[in-house]
Structures are given as C-alpha cells and as structure tokens.
Amino acid sequence: MNKILAGLFLSLVLLSGNSCSTGSDPEPEVLDVFTVPAQIAIQIHNIVNDLAMEVNGIAMHNLNFEEDTIKVNVSDCLDALVYRDASTSVLDSIVLDYGTTSCVSNGASFQGKIVVDPKNEALSKFDIRLRDFSSSSYDITGTIEFESTTIVSGSDFLLDVKNANFSILGSDEITYIFPISSVINEYTLIENDDNTTYTDDIFEFTSTLSGGTPDGMFFNLESVDVLTYDYSCKNINGGDADFSIVDLGDGTIDYGDPDSDCDTNATLRVSGKNITIAL
C-alpha cells in the first residue's frame, strides 16, 4: 500500500503538467495518474463491501439471539456480543469486537469495533458505528446506515455510507486522507442452499461510490451490471463497473465471471491496457 501511495503523489505531480489531457480514455502519459487512484478506489470499495457482508452475515442472522455471545460461524479472534435491555429484553446493540490487532473474519482483515444499533422496533433499520476501526491499513470513520429491504433478516439489504474518511499512513510517515462522500450498495440474495447458515449465500448487488484523493482529484465508481459476492469466495467475484476521474478519463473494472472465478483479483481496463488489482 505504501508503494501505491508513493505512486499516487508522484502521479499527481505529473498530472499538474498534463492538465489538457482529458477525454473518455486517458492518454499514455497520464496512465499512472489514472491507475493509482483507481487501485485505491477499488480497494476502498472492496472494504465497504467486506464491512457490509460482515454485518449482514453475523449481526443480521442473530437479531433474535438470546445469549450474550455469538459463536457459530464467527472467527476465533472476534467477540460478537449481544446487548439487550435488562427489563424488556429488547435488542440494544450488537458489537463486533475485533480487538487491537488484525483479525481475519470472512476473508477480510479488521481491527477495532463495529457497533450495530437498531433504529426501529421492526429491526429493519440500523445505524452502524465504527470505533477505532481499521481495515487493510486504512483507519475508517463515517456515517453508515443498514436497511433490510425484505422481511427476512440476512436477505436483501441496502448499505448507505456518507461522509467517510479512509486514512492511511504513507511511507513518509504522513497520514493521507481519502474522503468518500457516498457509497450506496443494494444487495439481493440469489442463492442460499442452507437456511441455517450464511456461509454459502450468494448475493448480487448494484453499487455507486464517489470520493477523492488527498490532493483534490475526484473519482466515481458505478456498477455497469450487477456485481456478485459469494460468501464461500469471500470476495466480489463477478460483474463490471465503470471508473472515472473528473477531467481525466474513465476505464472499466472487471471482477470476473461468477460461474468460474473465485480469486482475489479484479482487472482494470484502461487505455488499451489490462491491470490486475488485488482486492
């Protein structure tokens, strides 16, 4: 990641001398300044999806759990704690505590806490609070709302992120902040072979992400068709998305074929080149 950051700010310097390079496809001389923000946007998009799937898989499948600690289909390094009102037994919150060192859960690396707070009695709308939370070297803050869009919890849902900051420490010991103004992911459950667990579920989803770099470049990522997430793969493993940088150009992100791909890579297609990006 530090190499990516170094490339980003070198690219931003190059961009200042190529301000006339605009259009639908970046020119070769600004390819680097395009691909580095694209890599970071793809990684941030993947982190948001990991968070959504973590909350859906563990919290939404246990809204009626009557004990204090969820242990089924939960990583050993994660404490999944359920808090209820002592007098009414109404759910107060579910806290996913990953501790102070990296904890791998559902294929993603998390640190800190995710707090899931119900917003209504029907347990269909939730606020998600992040406490000292990080993933893939990014410290993350922001306003996050989760909404179940069917009557069955753990099925179709919407994740809405606003005014988030993804901060990362560069190799120069400077913290760089990537402001993400909005992410909206809408998920539809398409396969569930075992109703007793989420670990074999497959979702299709649409997605939009808008954000920027520390030096003021603005980018957008938007699914072209539905994307696919398979809990057994633990990654986005299908579909395409458009990626664009304002006043620079655009490219396409290929997540593969969900019927045959189950890897950790996406392909960025830009200016006639294919660039493999690890999710």
Image (cartoon, grey):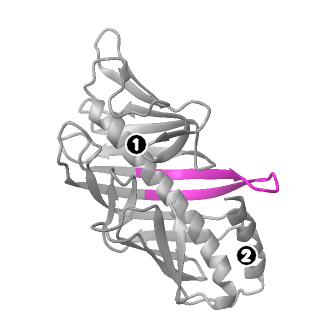
Q: Please give the range of residues in magenta.
A: 160-183
245 left or right, relative to 234: right
Residue 137 circle label: none
Quarter where residue 19 is shown: bottom right
- The residue wearing badge 2 is 11
Q: Is residue 84 part of the magenta span, yes or no?
A: no
Measure how far apart labels 2 and 1 are at the Cα level.
Answer: 34 Å
Which residue is painted at 59% across and 64% down in the image? Answer: 40
Q: Residue furthest top?
A: 87
- The residue wearing badge 1 is 54
Q: Amino acid at mark 1?
A: Glu
- Residue 29: x and y, percent? 69, 89
Nearer-the-camera pick, 70 or 73: 73
Give the quarter of the figure containing the N terminus.
bottom right
237 left or right, relative to 96: left
Work out whether mark 2 precedes mark 1 in sequence or the reverse, and give the earlier one: 2
Position of 262 relative to 249 (above/below): above
Which residue is painted at 79% across and 53% down in the image? Answer: 174
Nearer-the-camera pick, 150 or 257: 257
Q: Amino acid at mark 2?
A: Ser
Query: Is the residue marked by circle 2 packed among few (<14), some (14-19), or many (20+) residues within 10 Å?
Result: some
Q: Is residue 144 visible?
A: yes
- Residue 93: x and y, percent? 39, 26
Nearer-the-camera pick, 173 or 75: 75
Which residue is painted at 59% across and 87% down in the image? Answer: 26
Badge 2 element:
helix
